[in-house]
Image (tube, grey):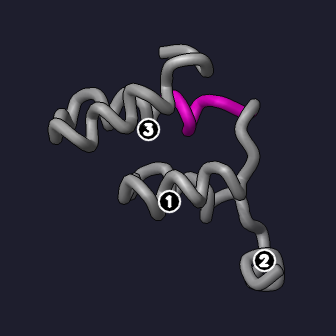
Amino acid sequence: FSDDNVHSLLKLGQRFQIKHILNLAEQHFIASSDHGLIEKMLLVEQYNLVRLKAHCFSTFKTLAEVRA
């Protein structure tokens, strides 16, 4: 996976319900620091990426950061 094709692969994985592709794309975003938190949370909502959601929430140190 690369930044150039990961979004396309997410769409295809969702459309054809290929969990392996979705898992690999999710892992790409978890490992990547090139994508901001807002982008990652939008992907969480759009593709129901549970592990990415947990990763994003684990980056918050306080409840105030979550609310901000």
Query: What numbered label is drawn on residue 33?
Result: none
Q: Which span is picked out in magenta?
A: 28-33
User: What residue is at 42 percent from the left and 31 percent from the top?
Assistant: 25
Tag 3 residue: 26
Residue type at numbered disc 1: Ala
Residue type at numbered disc 2: Thr
Taking 5 as reference, is 39 left or right? Answer: right
The residues bearing labels 2 and 1 have C-alpha atoms spaced at a distance of: 15 Å
Number of the front mark, 3 or 1: 3
Taking 52 as reference, is 22 left or right? Answer: left
Q: Nearer the viewer, residue 44 or 30?
A: 44
Number of the front mark, 2 or 1: 1
Tag 1 residue: 54
Q: Main secondary structure of the magenta part?
A: helix
**Label 2 or label 1, whichever comes before in sequence order:** 1
Tag 2 residue: 62
Image coordinates of residue 42 in percent, x first then y, are: 57, 58
Q: Nearer the viewer, residue 55 or 35?
A: 35
Is 53 magenta? The answer is: no
Q: Nearer the viewer, residue 27 or 5?
A: 5
Image coordinates of residue 58 in percent, x first then y, are: 62, 60
Number of the front mark, 2 or 3: 3
